[in-house]
Image: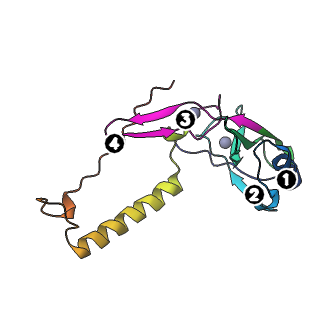
Amino acid sequence: MLQCTAVTQVPYAEALLALATMEGGPEHPPDAVEPEEFVLCELGDHDERAEHAAHLWTADTPDDQDLWLLWSGTGAHRVHRLDTLRLCPAVLREPATRTVTPCAYFDHHPGPHSFSVTDPLGDLIAEHVHSEVRRLVSEDGDPGAPGAPGASDVSDVPDVPDTDAP
Ligand SMILES: [Zn+2]
Ligand SMILES: [Zn+2]
């Protein structure tokens, strides 16, 4: 599942007000949002009936109420709202690597959880970084794995999502 490609401008004055009045908001709201700032929808690709959503602020409260910009439509037809929403409770557990990845979206978000959504640009950057690392490692020789004949033996284990979520 690819990430939605919708982009919108943050309503600056409204965002400042929301940041200033929310529980656990930033001490200095102008540091948290730029005038003329644009944000990407972070959800997995979705249809028109679901709102787009961009995360604006992680609240400093025990119950994780984050500020999101939600919108639908574009240009003059855009309808938007700023809302504090609870985190999605879903997590991705990978026993092999002992990692637990929480979903980065809000509770009851549309579509798949964040760990099932790929950002093509982010993947491109990650792939570039990996190939750079491989190049540096091969220039330096074996980084020291005992018994391993070389760094090229390190195999890429694909991430198999093992989700216990719907
Ligand atoms: Zn969207
Ligand atoms: Zn989720």
User: In the displayed image of the protein, which residue is found farthest to the front?
Assistant: 62
Question: Which disc, if any, is residue 113?
Answer: 3
Going from N to C along the chain, the mark reached first, 4 or 1, is 1
Residue highlighted by disc 2:
32
Regarding mark 1 in the picture, which secondary structure is present there? helix
Q: Is mark 3 within 8 Å of ligand 2?
A: yes
- Left or right: residue 97 versus residue 164 is left
The mark nearer the N terminus, 4 or 3, is 4
Mark 3 is on which residue type?
A: His
Q: CA distance from mark 3 to mark 1?
A: 28 Å
Which amino acid type is marked by label 1? Leu
Q: Is residue 125 left or right of residue 107?
A: left
Residue depicted at 57% across the width and 45% down the height: 3
Q: Which residues are magenta?
A: 84-111
**Residue placed at 79% from the left, 47% from the top?**
74
Which image quadrant for residue 31? bottom right
Q: Quickly name the residue at label 4.
A: 97
Q: Is residue 160 above or below residue 121?
A: above
